[in-house]
Image (cartoon, coloured by chain):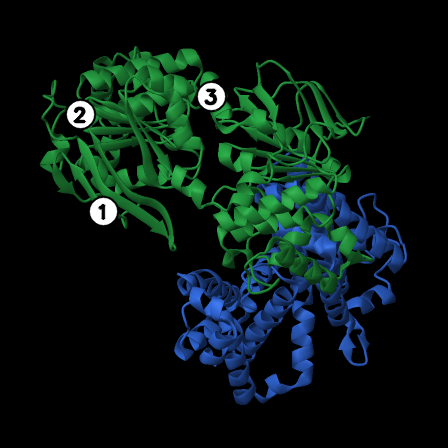
Amino acid sequence: MTTTQSTEVPTKAALVPATSPALRIQSAVIKYGFIFVTVTLFAYFALSEPSFRDSATLLDTLRYVSVAAILGLGVTLTMAVGGIDMSVGAVAGLGVTVAAKTMVSYNQVGLVAILAVIAAGALAGLLNALLIVVLKIPDMLATLGTMFVIQGTKLVLVDGQSITPGMTQADGSTAPGKFTEGFLRIDRGTVLGVPVSVLIFGALTVVAWVFLARTRWGRVLYAIGANPEASRLAGIRVGAYRALAYVLSGVLASIGGLILASRIGQGDVSAGTSQLLEAVAVALVGTSVLGRGRPNVWGTALGAVLIGIITTGLTIKGLPYYTQDVVEGAVLILALIFSFTLSKRRTA
Amino acid sequence: MSPTDTGTRGPAAPVPATAPAAVSLRGVGMAFGGKTVLESVSLDIAPGSVVALLGANGAGKSTLIKILSGVHTDHSGQVEVNGGPAALRSPLAARQLGIQTVHQRIGEGIVPGLTVAENLVFEELAQRRGNPFLDGRRLLARAREIQSALDLGWSDQVLKRDVTELGISDRQLLILARALATSPRLLVLDEPTSALSAAEAERLFALVERMRGDGIAVLYVSHRLGEIDALADRLVVLRDGRLTEDQSKPFDWDRALRAMLAQAQGAQTARPTDAKQSPLSGSGSGSGETAVSLKGVPLLPGRTPQDLDLRAGEVTGVVGLLGAGKTELARGLFGAEPFATGTVELDGRPYTPRRPADAIRRGVHLVPEDRHADALVPGWSLAQNVSLPFLRALSTAGLVNRRRENALGRGTIEQLGVVARDEHSTVEELSGGNQQKVVVGRWLAEKPRVLILDEPFRGVDIGARRDIGRRARALAAEGAAVLVLSADVDEVLEVADRVVVLAAGEIHLDAYGEDAERDRVIRTISASV
């Protein structure tokens, strides 16, 4: 194989030292190492635990990871422009509260709740964009700041209480509304046996992939992440595109919040907090999954699924739920080793 | 105290003429990835002498400095210190052998958050074994010692301040003082005055004079010829990795500049005659219509505003040393750093680009000076790098048409003779010259009205230079105004119809054809020193 290539392209062969089969296998293992590890684990779970092989288990796993995955897509967009959105968990949590408030306290229909949640997400994204693009605060610090502000705002909105149908409100009256049937179907309903939330996850993945990998806007986002000054000198309005990435991230996070709200069925004030680290982890794992070494949509989606498989598998194996964070953290570190340490050694 | 005895030796008092050189280079060479950047450089630097090192960008100056400061260790040839072979294995080893380097960027030398005194004795702080606790009094005493030995004029109050409260010139002096406190044998100063005003530079010159008196050898790297004239005993010129000129005072500046800015005689005859003769005997004579007209535009702050017209159908070459205002002119026209005042017209209409996007919309394109920092997107393919500014034209409903994009990449390969596997090659796989062709090709994807090329031939081989030059001339022939800015006289003469000499932000010569003859251009530059 090596020889045919070097005869076809003699000039390149002169530049690049011939790679031995052993080296190629090594580089393939590094490139696809993370997938390799997960497939091995998957096979192990599937062979040793019959319940893991059940399609319901797998769909449940996907349903479970859909929120972190959708938030991770937003993080991926912001990572593409060289930043990172740390406020996605808080924005999702805000979405839960806004959905509950709209339907339970204001007695509105599900569609109004959906629009309100998405508007709130876009607004949060605009706030991030303002801090980062206009006020020039470093991405991570700015979004950490908004994370706190959004979490706090959420508590202020509901006077620090979770919103449940029929609850007694601050003015002594009883909350007039409830989560509508249609809204609850976002997470609990199925189409042809597939949970709606999983379908949303799949659809958003495809849309985000087309946007980031196939449109000129996505191309420009990557250019900004890779070399902002060159992008500016190529005539790109760098600030506008970075703002776009954060607004889209806010909108995606709010969609994650909609699924979360539908899953919980009430305005849980603590919702969303655990989603942040998972979303960031998923996006980081995504940079390594396909050996691209840069944020990419398929990597993020696949990364979420892989993390889901591992945690589900270990849960079925009898690992207590409270060890889950340790496992997810270890998976993240493993992925980072693949994408930084090992791939560096390969190029050195 | 010091691990080697050489490190503790003080500067020799007045040295007899027969004393060995403080530092000698014997046939030192260096290559990066097969490209030779230094070739057999031999140089003796005598104790107590100030040797000025001149060279255009990419001549190999920084490589030479890095070898002397122990950063590049895999060079060929030999470095001798005090007559004996020396191994500059690391920056620490170089310092211990008595070679101190003060780098151009002052920010890299000081440690914010520490006091002036702590910064002065920082090397001792950083290396001291033994007592891990700072002894404030001892430290201050040592700092006081250094400051009085060098007459820095800093009171205890100043020494106790945070170093960030110092002005830029005091910071520069601090770094120098720190280097001198170790009693070096050779001090390498890399563009020490680039950030200083004239008055501030005077203080630095006084220190350099002092070093000479103390028998310290100084290698003074600068592009400010006036300083060199005043300070140096000797000047050497580095060109394409070779020492091409070596003069003692008084200096013959015409000769020095020719060695620095123009092709060596051998290289010139090696060049095909068509390339040498085509442009200046060419058509341009100032008859074309005016494309761009600058009026009252200051190119450098505080300098006289300049007027300049660029005509369609010709290549205007702007020659000038580093800091002459070339890049400011290019970036101003492109809207990357808009001009402070003055008016600019493009084809008779007002032209005030506030950002590059505005310039591109009006057909003004810039190939920037630094292709890695300002043009190429790392990891991207050739085709993707070419298409970046004009993606809209390649897209339908936002989707990038990759077939057309690839065709554009192939077009660039063909038009400019890019040596690449194909349009999918990443830019990292290409040589410097071919990377530069990609950047040029990017700005030809849509036909420019004005094409600005800032140092387009830097780090580019002769073949690529000719390909790019030919393309620039062809573009002018099609009616565009082309502006080429370079510090290299011959590069400019090779492509330009008209030559403009820029020095310190002001135009000193503006001539066509026979009037823009090589010696005249060089004389103008040296007269403007």
Chain letter of disc 1? Answer: B
Kind of residue at badge 3: Arg
Residue B220: image x %, image y %? 32, 26
Count how many numbered circles sit on residues in the image: 3
Residue A216: image x %, image y %? 73, 55
The colour chain B appears in is: green
Residue B144 is left or right of residue A343, and the answer is: left
Residue B400: image x %, image y %? 74, 59
Instruction: Give the residue at mark 2.
Output: B47
Kind of residue at badge 2: Pro
Q: Are marks 2 and 3 in contact (CB under 8 Å)?
A: no
Q: Are marks 3 and 1 in contact (CB under 8 Å)?
A: no
Residue B495 is left or right of residue B24, and the answer is: right
B245 to B63, vertically: above or below? above
Q: Are marks 2 and 3 on the same chain?
A: yes
Label 1 vs 2, first from the N-terminus: 2
Instruction: Give the residue at mark 3.
Output: B523
The chain coloured blue is: A
User: In the picture, residue B335 is in which quadrant?
Assistant: top right
- Residue B77's disc is 1
Q: Say which residue appears at 44% left-offset and 77% top-offset.
A: A25
Q: Say which residue appears at 71% left-offset and 66% top-offset.
A: A205
Secondary structure state at the residue bearing disc 3: helix
Residue B41 is left or right of residue A139, and the answer is: left
Alpha-carbon distance for marks 1 and 2?
A: 22 Å
Nearest to viewer (mark 3 / mark 1) = 3
Alpha-carbon distance for marks 2 and 3?
A: 33 Å
